[in-house]
Image (tube, rainbow, N blue to C red):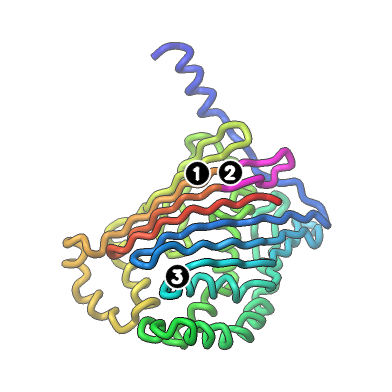
Amino acid sequence: MTVSLMLTIAMALQAQMKVAPKMEKGTVKTYVSESVITLPSQGDLKMTTDSKFTIADATADGYELDMVCTDVKTECDPGNIAGKLMSAAEEMMKGSVVRAALDKDGRVQNILNADEVKAGVDANANAFIDKLMTDVPQLAGVVSKDALKKQVSESLTIEALVQTLQEATSPLALNGKTIMTGAQEEFVNKDGIKMKRLYFVNGKTIIANSAINMTEEEMKQTIIKQVEQSAPDQVQMIKDNIDQLMKSGMLKMDYKESATYELQDDGWVKSIVVDTTTETMGQKVVSKSTVTLK
């Protein structure tokens, strides 16, 4: 190894960045998210959302931030059941202001109005679900109305809302982190899958590559939990045969994610590009999301 190569590697390893966006009361940032999700046997779902982030107040401990989805546009085939469900989930949150408590570095600590958000969405949930069942009649054979209402309710807990604001596609995802090339962290994604993330830093560009990080036993428990939510009537069959199914490869689980962040001089995210591939029980979902500051 040459001296110049050794120096290059050493400098790369030492490159690090503290992500702490400049915030003050009245700061407003608007982001446009464009996603294309390829679903098994159902084609693509194209979704565009506008979200507004406003620093509503500065406190002794940090800040209060209001986040609201102001516009949702979706495009998918009429028979794309999964796509229709994802679209409905976004539509139900449109216009609902989520107020988050942030620390002084902008890291999400809590949701201050979770009950208010839940009440607002619940008030419209029945109408949305009834319309969804009418628009996609075959949905009734896949999931019940009560199961859909339960999923909506579970997505509005404080823990679920905090996790949404910390996902890779969120402009708040890196806030409060000191990141250096080669740094790793473990986390659990929104689907309950344990992951490991590896960071690379190059100036104001941060790349985060993630992969599944679970034992076989953890995979079994995660699969059972997912089946409990999506197909309760099949849970016992899966439990009784899970060892055999795992050995056969029918329950193979894989999850990979690559996210690239470009930061501005004020520390706020300028753009995010996230590529994700998920494979569960033989079903592969590929998505690409681009988030851009207006």
Instruction: Quote the CA–CA distance across marks 3 and 2.
Output: 31 Å
Looking at this view, name the residue that lies furthest to the right. 26
Q: Which residue is mark 1?
A: 208
Residue 48 in the image: x percent, y percent?
Answer: 59, 61
Q: Which residue is mark 2?
A: 261
Question: 254 or 102, which lies in front?
Answer: 254
The kind of residue on which mark 1 rests is: Ala
The kind of residue on which mark 2 rests is: Tyr
Q: Are marks 1 and 2 in contact (CB under 8 Å)?
A: yes
Task: Tell me, for residue 136, which label it has, or none.
Answer: none
Looking at this view, name the residue that lies furthest to the front. 77
Instruction: Quote the CA–CA distance across marks 1 and 2.
Output: 8 Å
Count residues near mark 3 (Cα–Cα under 10 Å), then give few for <14, some for 14-19, many for 20+: few
Instruction: Quote the CA–CA distance across marks 1 and 3.
Output: 32 Å
Residue 78 in the image: x percent, y percent?
Answer: 45, 74
The kind of residue on which mark 3 rests is: Asp
Q: Is residue 268 magenta?
A: yes
Question: 203 or 176, which lies in front?
Answer: 203
Would you identify the image quadrant in which residue 127 lies? bottom right
Q: Earlier in the sequence, mark 3 or mark 2?
A: 3
Vertical order, 85 against 287 (above or below):
below
Residue 113 in the image: x percent, y percent?
Answer: 69, 73
Closer to the eye: label 3 or 2: 3
Q: Which residue is mark 3?
A: 77
Q: Is residue 99 magenta?
A: no
